[in-house]
Image: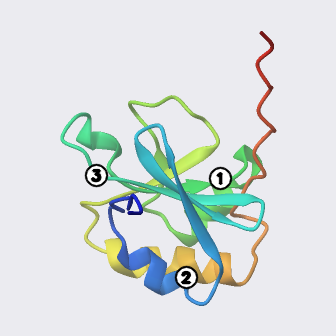
Amino acid sequence: MKNYIMIPHDFILDLLYPLPIRTKKMFGNVAMYCGDKIVLATRQKEENPVDNGIWIGTKIEHHNALKKLIPELRHLETYKIKKWLLLHEDEPNFETRAQQIAELIKENSDLIGNIPKPRKKKTI
């Protein structure tokens, strides 16, 4: 029997269709990859709800451009991970803005996505 991951804000997967998105658990969230790039993560937890919503994987140099396109984006508060921006789930235009983010990803915009550094193998 396969283990299924519960994906918060799973409508984003429909918005990203037909991209070959794969999911993986990350920091208790669900990360979404398109090819080698991590593009999004979703979070919806009772603990620290200030960072619930859709996390956008990006580079710091793209933050201003993304915030101009989507003014509701902000930095994470609980997690001090500087590369990520957050579209909080309580934003009045949450689904509309999520659609904009999905369109940028589908257009392969340079504004969204990071290629994670390879993990170091543990030596015994």
User: Does the CB distance between marks 2 and 1 fall below 8 Å?
Assistant: no
Indicate left or right for 42 with 104 as reference.
left
Q: Disc 2 vs disc 1: which is toward the camera?
A: 2
Secondary element type, mark 2: helix
Q: Would you call the spot at circle 3 few (<14 residues within 10 Å), some (14-19), or many (20 or more)?
A: many
Instruction: Judge by depth and name the residue closer to the eye, 94 or 31.
Output: 31
Q: Is residue 32 above or below residue 26?
A: below
The image position of residue 89, as x and y in percent, is 29, 60
The image position of residue 59, as x and y in percent, is 73, 49
The image position of residue 37, as x and y in percent, is 74, 59
- Image quarter hosting the N terminus: bottom left
Secondary element type, mark 1: helix
Q: Is residue 113 above or below residue 28?
A: below
User: Does the CB distance between marks 3 and 1 fall below 8 Å?
Assistant: no
The image position of residue 13, as x and y in percent, is 47, 77
**Looking at numbered disc 1 in the image, what kind of residue is underneath it?**
His
Residue 16: give its label. 2
* Residue furthest out toward the top: 124
Residue 63: give its label. 1
